[in-house]
């Protein structure tokens, strides 16, 4: 079944920033044929600098789950979602400026895992509890230096705030309905992009290790680890996490925006959802084999 589903979108190696950039450019210029052709390469260049240790005062990302590929998976999904939403004629119609800001937001949404150069203790995973706040702060400093306006930076920060597991969406000070929609799309893509990945099941122990480090670093947020009895327990709970938390969040909190990825829209197959369901089957089989 997955072999058929994969033909819904062009296969993309999400470890390769250039491959993802090409797809995002295709979505952008498909929506805005007269758009700024250097925009996507430019902002991808900023993200690459940030995550590879070429941004002043910051080291390359060393979190093993929330790595640069994780960001690229979400970025690819967001570009596809917004392109599909545009093709469906959804309202409010995305403007070129807010599309640009959404792409900037998804590229920067996990910069809160980056460590300063004098921060030599552990990995960036220790900032799991505060990474959304840190990402919004990082975006402020980066974008202010690139000449973005105060309102544009606030848009990016509001969209980034949609990615927190415990995000209080109704408290985010969105400046417009469209900004809110694109923020919800960003949150949707962050969840779908990572959970649909081919190696999602294999990386769950790495995610657990990040939670362990986060709990050791920030004693005030020990819920990251106290709810799990170990990596095996986290893996056992993941299918219910998908069924009882992520799916309702996609449907209710994020307004069912993931349905724009249905092909054909509105009642066709959803490659991302089906890949996640396949990952849950794979995970259950893996757990059963260990008994």
Image (tube, grey):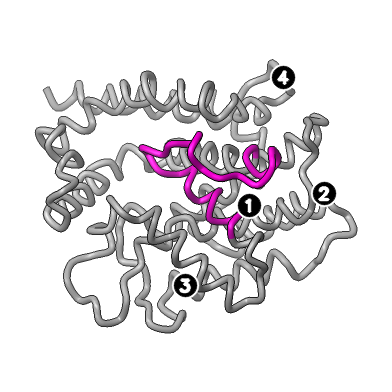
- Residue sitting nearer the eye, 243 or 13: 243
Residue 181 at x, y = what percent?
65, 37
> Which label number is shown at residue 266?
4
Kindly indicate whether the residue at mark 1 contacts the one at mark 3 (C-beta within 8 angstroms): no
Q: Which residue is mark 2?
A: 30
Can the viewer see residue 3?
no
Q: Nearer the viewer, mark 3 or mark 2?
A: 3
Q: CA distance from mark 3 to mark 2?
A: 27 Å
Q: Which residue is mark 3?
A: 50
Secondary-structure class at tag 3: helix
| Mark 3 / mark 1, whichever is N-terminal | 3
On the image, the x and y values in percent for residue 157 come to 53, 55
Quadrant housing residue 165? top left
Residue interval drawn in magenta? 154-181
How far apart, in angstroms, are the residues tagged by discs 4 and 3?
Answer: 38 Å
> Which residue does the numbered mark 1 point to in the structure image?
102
- Distance (Cα) linking label 1 and label 4: 23 Å
Lower position in the chain sequence, tag 4 or tag 2: 2
């Amino acid at each position: 079944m997955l072999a058929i589903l994969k033909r819904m979108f062009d296969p993309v190696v999400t470890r390769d920033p250039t491959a993802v950039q090409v797809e995002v450019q295709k979505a952008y210029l498909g929506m805005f044929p007269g758009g700024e052709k250097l925009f996507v390469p430019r902002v991808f260049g900023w993200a690459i600098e940030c995550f590879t240790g070429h941004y002043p005062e910051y080291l390359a990302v060393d979190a093993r789950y929330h790595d640069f590929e994780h960001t690229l998976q979400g970025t690819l999904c967001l570009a596809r979602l917004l392109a599909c939403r545009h093709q469906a004629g959804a309202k409010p119609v995305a403007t070129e400026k807010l599309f640009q800001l959404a792409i900037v937001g998804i590229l920067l949404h996990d910069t809160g895992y980056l460590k300063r150069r004098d921060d030599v203790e552990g990995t960036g995973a220790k900032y799991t509890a505060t990474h959304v706040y840190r990402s919004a702060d990082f975006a402020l400093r980066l974008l202010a230096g690139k000449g973005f306006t105060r309102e544009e930076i606030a848009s990016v920060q509001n969209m980034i705030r949609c990615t927190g597991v415990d995000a209080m969406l109704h408290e985010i000070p969105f400046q417009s309905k469209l900004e809110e929609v694109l923020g919800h799309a960003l949150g949707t893509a962050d969840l779908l992009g990572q959970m649909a990945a081919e190696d999602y099941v294999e990386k769950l122990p790495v995610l657990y290790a990040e939670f362990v480090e986060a709990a050791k670093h920030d004693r005030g947020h020990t819920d990251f680890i106290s709810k799990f009895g170990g990596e095996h327990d986290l893996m056992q709970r993941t299918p219910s996490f998908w069924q009882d938390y992520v799916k309702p969040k996609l449907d209710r909190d994020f307004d069912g925006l993931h349905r724009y990825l249905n092909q054909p829209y509105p009642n066709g197959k959803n490659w991302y959802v089906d890949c996640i369901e396949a990952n849950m089957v794979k995970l259950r089989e893996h757990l059963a084999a260990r008994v």
